[in-house]
Image: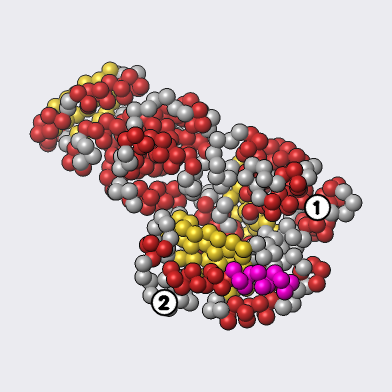
């Protein structure tokens, strides 16, 4: 887009993959560079660096970007420009939001950016809202409700449903501007924010919550709030993306934080001093949003404007891809696992270990890819590493229950049937039992022919009455040995079935 330097030695420049695309997001609070690799349907963040310039801190009082803030931002942006040139990344998008958009000297700042080789696009409030909503849709394809993107200078609200958006608004309620509404106490602040939200046309309090749908919270301050809530609940996962609270839980969280002092939150539960300073005011804003929008639940999203920029550039067929499977396929492929082989193995297990719930087949396939990828790891560290992938890697399109099912299947594939407590805390016994059966069936498929594709062509696993049946072609009857017998007994016992092996002609397969 704006770079002409040679693309040499790029793989060594950023750990974890080849950098393909970058976004510079010039916000009211932070200026951030994010470099992405992998599949753009579920991109991997290879570099994420920010400068807390607080460009918007004096907009309300002076209408201008402060000289000190501009200087700090420009120093960081010069570094970003050098990094991008040295990495050889040509596909770079630079966007500026509320602070630059609203400041009288915003055009002067844009001219400074052009002088260092950047080509920024100052986006409107409506465009900012729509991009954030598209990021949420990319992460949650079935999202239905309202997206609330809280930045330093503004709050964007937009409806989402069925992969489309409606009614985008931008309100001057960013974290740097919330103190203007404080008044004498939190009660006055709540009334002021409530009035501002209603004045902007957002008042759904008369609707039943199930009609309004979810409230999707986007932005770093909201994520810090999620981290606080996760720690308070003893949540076993570390990534706040996808963390949910029902409406009552969200109200309780907002009330707790609204009454807190920012100093008491600093350094607590991985919350930075900068975020802690803003949490009490943001909590009062959340109280007002919950009252006026009446959602059935709150969902925290790490995907927002930047991911919306990536999502908007995807062709329709790529947008339609499952984000979990797209991400896992690339990750597993980097570790020697072919998605086609994993798909065939997952299909091989279907008759013996059928899905109990609609949509769980995607989890089975993801678990199969990760389990096969884990076989490339040294045996003494294989299972802990693979279970960590399932629970803590930043997958998109999966909730806590789904992560637990991935972990349970991977554990069973490795013959670990006693599941860690953090896994058991995330899903029901029935869901975990289903995943364990997937894992045991995969273990049988994998060990039967040492993962050779031919072994899947000359065998079939099915249930016949009260027996688990392994059919083997005559040409490959010798594949049945002590390991296969052990795996058959283990799976059959878990299914509550007897078992047998039938040797058949290849024509019957």
Report whether residue 351 is seen.
no
Using residue 167 as the reference point, say whether residue 469 is left or right of it: left
From the viewer's side, name the closer residue of 117 and 360. 117
Which segment did they paint magenta? 66-76
Q: Position of residue 214 (x, y in %)?
A: 63, 46
Secondary element at image label 2: loop
The residue carrying pointer 2 sits among few (fewer than 14), some (14 to 19) or many (20 or more) residues within 10 Å by Cα, namely few
Give the answer, above or below, for where 447 lies relative to 418: below
The residue at the point 66 percent across, 36 percent down is 232
Residue beneath label 1, please? 194
Residue beneath label 2, please? 5
Give the answer, above or below, for where 159 lies relative to 452: below
Residue 71 on the magenta span: yes
Using residue 269 as the reference point, say whether residue 441 is left or right of it: left
From the viewer's side, name the closer residue of 314 and 229. 229
CA separation in Å, label 2 and label 1: 51 Å
The residue carrying pointer 1 sits among few (fewer than 14), some (14 to 19) or many (20 or more) residues within 10 Å by Cα, namely many
The residue at the point 17 percent across, 41 percent down is 454
Q: Position of residue 395 (x, y in %)?
A: 47, 47
Give the answer, above or below, for where 310 lies relative to 75: above
Q: Residue furthest right?
A: 184
Please, what is the dominant secondary structure of the magenta stretch?
helix
Give the answer, above or below, for where 53 lies relative to 113: above
The residue at the point 25 percent across, 22 percent down is 486
From the viewer's side, name the closer residue of 327 and 210. 327
- Quarter of image, res 78: bottom right
Report whether residue 172 is seen.
yes
Give the number of the disc on residue 361. Answer: none
Q: Position of residue 305 (x, y in %)?
A: 58, 61
The quarter of the rendered structure image containing the C terminus is: top left
Residue 303 on the magenta span: no
Q: Which callout, 2 or 1, points to the residue nearer the camera?
A: 2
């Amino acid at each position: 887009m704006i770079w002409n330097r040679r693309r040499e030695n790029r793989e060594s420049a950023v750990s974890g993959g080849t950098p393909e695309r970058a976004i510079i997001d010039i916000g009211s609070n932070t200026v951030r560079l994010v470099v992405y690799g992998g599949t753009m349907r579920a991109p991997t963040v290879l570099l994420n660096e920010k400068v807390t310039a607080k460009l918007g801190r004096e907009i309300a009082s002076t209408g201008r970007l402060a000289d000190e803030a501009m200087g700090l931002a420009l120093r960081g942006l010069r570094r970003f420009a050098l990094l991008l040139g040295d990495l050889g990344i040509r596909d770079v998008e630079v966007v500026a939001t509320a602070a630059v958009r609203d400041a009288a000297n915003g055009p002067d700042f844009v001219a400074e950016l052009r002088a260092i080789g950047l080509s920024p696009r100052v986006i409107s409030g409506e465009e900012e809202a729509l991009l954030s909503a598209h990021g949420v849709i990319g992460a949650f394809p079935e999202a239905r409700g309202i997206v609330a993107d809280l930045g330093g200078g503004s709050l964007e609200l937009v409806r989402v449903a069925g992969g489309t958006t409606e009614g985008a608004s931008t309100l001057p309620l960013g974290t740097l501007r919330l103190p203007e509404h404080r008044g004498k106490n939190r009660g006055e602040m709540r009334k002021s924010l409530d009035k501002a939200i209603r004045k902007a046309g957002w008042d759904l309090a008369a609707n039943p919550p199930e009609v309004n749908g979810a409230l999707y919270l986007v932005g770093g301050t909201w994520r810090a709030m999620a981290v606080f809530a996760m720690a308070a609940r003893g949540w076993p996962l570390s990534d706040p993306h996808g963390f949910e609270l029902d409406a009552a839980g969200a109200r309780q969280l907002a009330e707790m934080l609204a009454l807190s002092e920012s100093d008491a939150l600093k350094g607590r539960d991985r919350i930075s001093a900068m975020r802690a300073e803003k949490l009490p005011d943001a909590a009062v804003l959340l109280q007002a949003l919950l009252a006026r929008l009446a959602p059935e639940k709150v969902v925290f999203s790490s995907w927002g404007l930047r991911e919306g920029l990536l999502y908007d550039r995807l062709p329709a067929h790529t947008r339609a891809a499952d984000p979990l499977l797209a991400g896992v396929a690339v990750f597993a492929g980097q570790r020697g696992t072919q998605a086609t082989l994993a798909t065939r193995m997952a299909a091989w297990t279907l008759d013996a270990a059928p899905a109990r719930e609609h949509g769980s087949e995607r989890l089975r396939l993801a678990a199969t890819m990760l389990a096969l990828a884990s076989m490339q790891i040294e045996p003494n560290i294989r299972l802990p590493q693979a279970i960590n992938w399932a629970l803590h890697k930043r997958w998109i399109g999966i909730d806590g229950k789904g992560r637990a099912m991935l972990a349970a299947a991977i554990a069973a594939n490795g013959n670990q049937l006693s599941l860690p407590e953090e896994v058991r805390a995330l899903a029901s016994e029935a869901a975990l039992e289903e995943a364990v059966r997937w894992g045991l069936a995969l273990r049988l498929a994998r060990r039967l022919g040492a993962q050779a594709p031919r072994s899947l062509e000359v065998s079939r696993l099915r249930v016949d009455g009260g027996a688990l049946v392994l059919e083997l072609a005559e040409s490959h009857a010798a594949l049945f040995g002590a390991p296969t017998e052990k795996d058959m007994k283990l799976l059959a016992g878990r299914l509550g079935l007897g078992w047998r092996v039938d040797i058949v002609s290849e024509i019957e397969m």
